[in-house]
Structures are given as C-alpha cells and as structure tokens.
Amino acid sequence: MYILKCADDSYYVGSTKNLDLRIAQHQSGKGSRYTSGRLPIELVYGEEYDRVSDAYYREKQVQNWSRAKREALIGGNTELLPPLAKKKFVKKQKSLVE
C-alpha cells in the first residue's frame, strides 16, 4: 500500500505487487486517470504486506480517511490516528422563522 502526493497537493492511495514499476507508471502518466492529470507525483508513504488481499484492504481503509488522518500516518504520528478517527458532530441551531 502506498500514498502519493500529487502536484496539486492532493493524495492518491494505491496498492501494488511491484512498487517501483507502479511509481514509474504513475510518473509516465499511465498509472491512473487521477494521477495522470496531477503530475509530477511523489511517493510519501508505503507499507508492505505478505498478502495482496491485506494490502488491498489497507488501501481501501486509508482511502476513506480524512486528509488530516492521512497526514498523521505519513508523518509517523500514529498517536494522532485514534482522535482523528472520531466523528465530530456539529449541533445545528434551530432558526426562529415567524
């Protein structure tokens, strides 16, 4: 599982069996439609798994994370992950319309 930082400052999360090949594909514009329009890209994070299914599961998990949570992972600030996982509910005030 890997995370790329794109030229527009967005993140792309993917998984692959061959990271070097996949990065080369992304850099050449053939990696994905998302990254091809946001070149150049930079590898900012990676995790290695023994099973492809585990890497794919982790990819889908991280894809659903907020930017703040991804940046905590990239920065190695794993202690921030649990608080960032908590949903923040904003209480809406009722408007008084007469």
Image (cartoon, helix red, strand yellow):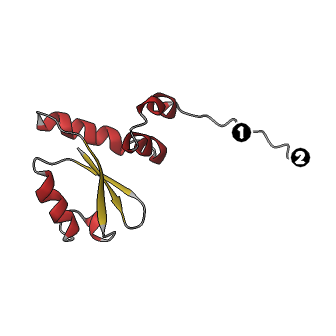
The three-letter code of the residue at mark 2 reads Glu
Asked whether disc 1 touches disc 2, contact meaning CB atoms under 8 Å apart, the reply is no
Is residue 36 placed above or below 88 in the rendered structure?
below
What is the x, y in percent for residue 96? 85, 43
Residue 58 appears in the figure: yes
Which of label 1 and label 2 is nearer to you? 1
68 lies left or right of 74? right
Tell me which residue sits at (30%, 64%) in the image.
41
| Image quadrant assignment for residue 65 | top left
81 lies left or right of 38? right
The three-letter code of the residue at mark 1 reads Lys
Tell me which residue sits at (30%, 69%) in the image.
40
Is residue 60 placed above or below 38 in the rendered structure?
above
Residue 34 appears in the figure: no
Tell me which residue sits at (16%, 64%) in the image.
25
Category of crowding for the residue at label 1, using alpha-carbon neighbours closer than 10 angstroms: few (below 14), some (14–19), many (at least 20): few
Category of crowding for the residue at label 2, using alpha-carbon neighbours closer than 10 angstroms: few (below 14), some (14–19), many (at least 20): few
Residue nearest the viewer, comparing 42 with 94: 42
Tell me which residue sits at (26%, 66%) in the image.
33
What is the x, y in percent for residue 79? 45, 29
The residue to which callout 2 is attached is 98
Which quadrant, please, contains the N terminus?
top left
The residue to which callout 1 is attached is 92
Nearest to N terminus: mark 1 or mark 2: 1
Mark-to-mark CA distance, 1 and 2: 18 Å
- Is label 2 in a helix, a strand or a loop? loop
Is residue 26 placed above or below 15 in the rendered structure?
below
